[in-house]
Image (cartoon, rainbow, N blue to C red):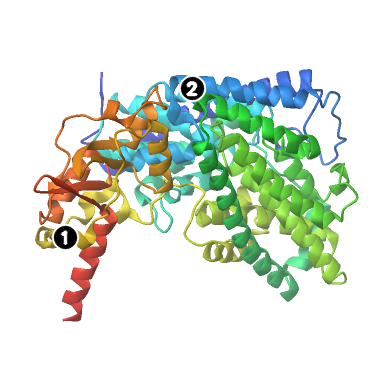
Amino acid sequence: MLLKLRNLDYYKKWAVIGVILGIVVGISSLLIYYAIVYVTHLLLFEIAGYSAPTPLGEGGSLTYVYKMARPYMIPIILVAGGLLSGIIVYGLAPETEGHGTDAAISAFHNSNGEVRARVPFVKLISSAITIGSGGSAGREGPTAQVSAGIGSIIGKFIDINENDKRLMTAIAVGSGIGAIFKAPFGGALLSAEVLYKRDMEVETIFPSIIASSIGFLIFGAFTGYNPIFGFNAPQIESILPFLFNAVGIIAFIAIGFMSGLFSRLYIRIFYGIHDLFRKIKVNNMFKPAIGAAIMSIFALAFPQVLGIGYGWVQLMMSGNLAAFVNTYGMPLFVFFFLLAIVKIIATSLSIGSGGSGGVFAPGMFAGASFGVAIALIMHILLPSMISTIYILPLAIVSMLSFFGAAGKVPIAVTMMVSEMTGTLMLLPFAMISIAVAYIVSGEKSIYRSQVATRKDSPAHINDYRVPVITNIRIKKEMLNAFSLSPSDKVYDAVSFMKRSSLNAIPISKNSRLLGLLKLSDALESTDRTGRISKMIGTKKCYIKLNDTAESAWKFMIENGVMICPVVENGRYMGFVRMRDILNEFESVTNKKVSK
């Protein structure tokens, strides 16, 4: 039975959907949270004898004594967790591999927001195992994908159009993250911002505020409403002299600049390891175990990288650096810089190998550790102006500047500064630092499925369809000539498409087009080592040279892809991307304006 919403006005329709999604994300957040807590307690605490610190907002304290009763069990637990997670993911739903949020973003742009019904359940179980066994990953990515998946299922029972179903996916992503971070307003903004590098989906903000607030209320009813990271009054009073002077402002600008540069390293290392694992000639379900085995080496030397790491972030922000044992006699600023690098490598091995978990929390850990290192260097250079107690504001701002730049979500994380710390004091300084970091970070994002602007998204292809495209013809100069062979393997095709930011690729042989392979179909394949030839259909999948750009756009809309193969006299010529058409469109319109 369908819930009839199609004919309601914007606010009434989205108020109803917002309430529904709020309940969904609240329950999803609790399921993820308690599943991870339970598995972590069972594996790391009961078996390895390791109890990680927890932040104030989750019942922790500002003091912590490190203890690892059976460190020799860590490699065994990590590898077993990676193996079990890999079997579940690649055996049931390959699209749940990785960090979750990226898959949900891709569903918005390329699949009308549709997520397979099994995805939420597979993501929930695999993420709990990955993180609970010590994998370096966050719970926000799984929460986003689980919420988006359940929202997609509910969308089938609501009478709304395809665009509204896409928006439901984005709303579920942002509000799910907002609920589990106890940052509802930041989550609402995230739903609009995370889809693009330089744009926003403003239609999601109103329903996301409703959904994120309700999700937060449900999640907080069981876990408490205190901000994740807290401080006491003396701490806040002690940093006031630093905030409101020229030295402090210059320090925050410097933190933003260096965090932006460091975010580039995060993206490069993560996808470098991710792409390396795609080239390894091993069944995909065993790769997370390989990644876990390598990570265990780093975890034995730096146990702080195990799991989510919010408690360690709290200790950094509170200035309790003595809790970080085994600094190996190196200067503290060197140790914390090295710890940030190791956390990035550990995350890349846990998630980039095919494990299941988010990249937001590890990014916060790496950013905070990097901020501590920079704060200590500033103290060494200017001891009379920058005290060690100023680690608190610098670590917080570095943490969020770093991920705001890496994830291309500067506005959302700016609001999260206040919500996650429970104070507005750092907001103006965070705004400066995050803006600088975003500018410095460049074009690449930790979320590969992001597109630059709305006009680059298949979801908005009709919004930019104007009469002039009927006069644009597909020319040889617009084509990209490469393709894959039917003898190539499916996992090679997946790796190539992800590396090239494509969601489909033509298959040809001897200059003859044989078909079009979609990334979504390849990800759903149960035989990643099989040949592409087994997945090629007979449906016509091309246009001809000199056809209009409108024909190419229509092909892309109907097939949910961002490319269109071009054939002339039976010979495969190459393919045209949406970006190529848009560039030609801009060139034509610019010429008309100049005349």
449 on left or right of 52: left
User: Of the residues shown, which amino acid type is indicated by label 1?
Assistant: Lys
> Where does residue 545 sit, x and y in percent of width and height?
12, 54
**Quadrant of the drawing holding the N terminus:** top left
User: Of the residues shown, which amino acid type is indicated by label 2?
Assistant: Val
535 on left or right of 291: left
> Where does residue 249 sit, x and y in percent of width and height?
69, 70
Q: Nearer the viewer, residue 489 or 268?
A: 489
Query: Which numbered marker is on residue 475?
Result: 1
Residue that appears at 28% across and 47% down: 562
Question: Which one is earlier in the sequence, the residue at label 1 or at label 2?
Answer: 2
Mark 1 or mark 2, whichever is nearer to me: 1
| Local SS, label 1 | loop
Is residue 227 in sight in this rendering?
no
Separation of residues labelled 1 and 2 (CA atoms): 45 Å
Residue that appears at 25% across and 22% down: 2
Vertical arrangement, residue 513 with respect to residue 74, above or below: below
255 on left or right of 589: right
> Where does residue 5 sit, x and y in percent of width and height?
26, 32
Occupied quadrant, residue 42: top right
Vertical arrangement, residue 534 with respect to residue 386, above or below: above
Q: Nearer the viewer, residue 447 or 485?
A: 485
Query: Which numbered marker is on residue 122?
Result: 2
> Where does residue 95 sit, x and y in percent of width and height?
43, 30
